[in-house]
Amino acid sequence: MSDFICQFGQEGTNSQYYLSSSRQSIINIVSVLSAGTFCGAIAQAFTSDRLGRCGSILFWSAIFTVGVAIQTSTTYSLVQLLIGRHIAGLGAGSLSAIVPLYNGETAPKAIRGTILAIYQVQIISGVFLSYVFELGSHTINNSASWRLPIGLQMVWGIIILSGMFFLPESLRHLLGTGRGDQARKVIAELNGVPEDDPLVIEIVRELDFAIRAENEGGKATWLECFSTRNALWRRTINGMVLQFIQQLNGQNFYYFYGDTFFQSAGAGRTILGAVSLFGTLPALYFIETWGRRKSMLLGASAQAVCALIVAVIGHATLAPTGTPTSALTPRNRAGGNVVITFAVFQVFIFNTTWGSTPWVYLGESFPLRVRPKSIAFGCATNWFWNFMLSYFSPRIVDRIGPMIMFVFFGMLVFGYIYVYFAIPETKGLTLEEVDELYRSGIAPWRSVGWRPSEKHYHPEVHEKQGSVKNLAAIRP
């Protein structure tokens, strides 16, 4: 935007202001993706246990909001802008880890996947709104052109800050930190019964037993995330690899550099934003109907086909980057339409499957003892490869053009193979049952329909029966 360039750019020899490539790189990559979100994803592990899940979300929401306010109030200081972006990045990276952690611990297992998928819907909704605001404000001839879309982010920070005061702390965290009285109060409020009700006593007893057994051996360390205990190393690596594959599905390439592909259509990221928003809605249904494995297997297969078509057709028909629209041949236009069509299909399929599912899997795969740390590894992996993609993609595209999609095709094939042989199905299991699933050593491709042999806390049973007596009658 012209006003932004005048305030933060450099004056050229022709007295016109411009943003140098190095300054753009500092603003867009280093300050946010690398130093901000990556560090934030790790930093939340130090606050999640100390401040609690709710307290940690409040803390990092405040950090994020302050960072946005610093950016919005900037006048001519590039340093102030970078500081604000770094602080906001810390908050965004931390929240990307804490929210799945909190939802994974508080949501009933029957709808946990749906609730975690709603998290992705909300993210995409915010992204789409930001694109719309940018389109609507870029014609303004003063600083409001860029202050409005940046300042809009404070609305979401304030919503989280105010909303968390009405949500309960994670039940498992309360019991894990010895606050049984508060845990009983939360259970009683959620079930609409007195604190001395047998239902409350039974739930506390079962969860407290599981948490005490899990916490034997003292405080967890970062290295324990890769220990052989309860196959933690497999679970942590699974979370990291899924986040790695998610970033290299190809969809983020379209987001970062899709304007080049969409030139002939006269539109850019707004199309992708709308497609992403509508693509996340079916995920709310498929993630519980298909399960985690099937969702990722089908998604990888369908996206691989789209990526292959884009690579072949794009390489054979697209005009060189920078070619004026008026100079495009009928062959260029026809090929461009095919590329756009399958790019849209790929982005839609991604948001229906891989957009949400790896986050759901990350939020439900770890025991309370190492949850913040293991989820931190997964989220940090996501942000690291997001940075690597944004940094290296333009250099690769300059050399091979649309054939970069062959790279993403290969990654999707790898993703299919990895999910098939390494990712067990966790649909319909409590966090304690996921522990037994990994201990059982069952092959991932045989895990669909697996049921635990041990006694675990089943919230759906409590809800249906409403009493300990009936609960005991239906359990084997």
Image (cartoon, rainbow, N blue to C red):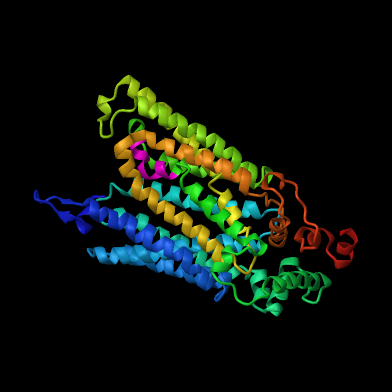
Q: Answer with left or right where residue 170 lies relative to residue 476.
A: left
Q: Answer with left or right where residue 170 lies relative to residue 260.
A: right
- Farthest residue in the top direction? 330
Look at 63% across and 51% down and name the residue there. 114
Measured from the top left, where is residue 10 in percent x and y? 17, 56
Measured from the top left, where is residue 266 in percent x and y? 34, 34
Depth check: give the residue in front, 184 or 43. 43
Residue 354, compared with residue 84, is above or below; it is above
The span picked out in magenta is 252-262
Measured from the top left, where is residue 460 in percent x and y? 77, 58
Q: Main secondary structure of the magenta part?
A: helix
Measured from the top left, where is residue 44 in percent x and y? 50, 68
* Placement of the C terminus among the 4 image quadrants: bottom right
- Whether the magenta-drawn stretch holds residue 59 is answered as no
Residue 18 appearing in the image: yes
> How many numbered marks appear?
0
Q: Answer with left or right where residue 401 lies relative to residue 305.
A: left
Q: Answer with left or right where residue 246 lies relative to residue 177.
A: left
Depth check: give the residue in front, 48 or 248. 248
Look at 84% across and 60% down and name the residue there. 465
Residue 144 appearing in the image: no
Look at 34% across and 65% down and name the residue there. 84
Look at 57% across and 63% down and name the residue there. 226
- Farthest residue in the front direction? 228
- Whether the magenta-drawn stretch holds residue 256 is answered as yes
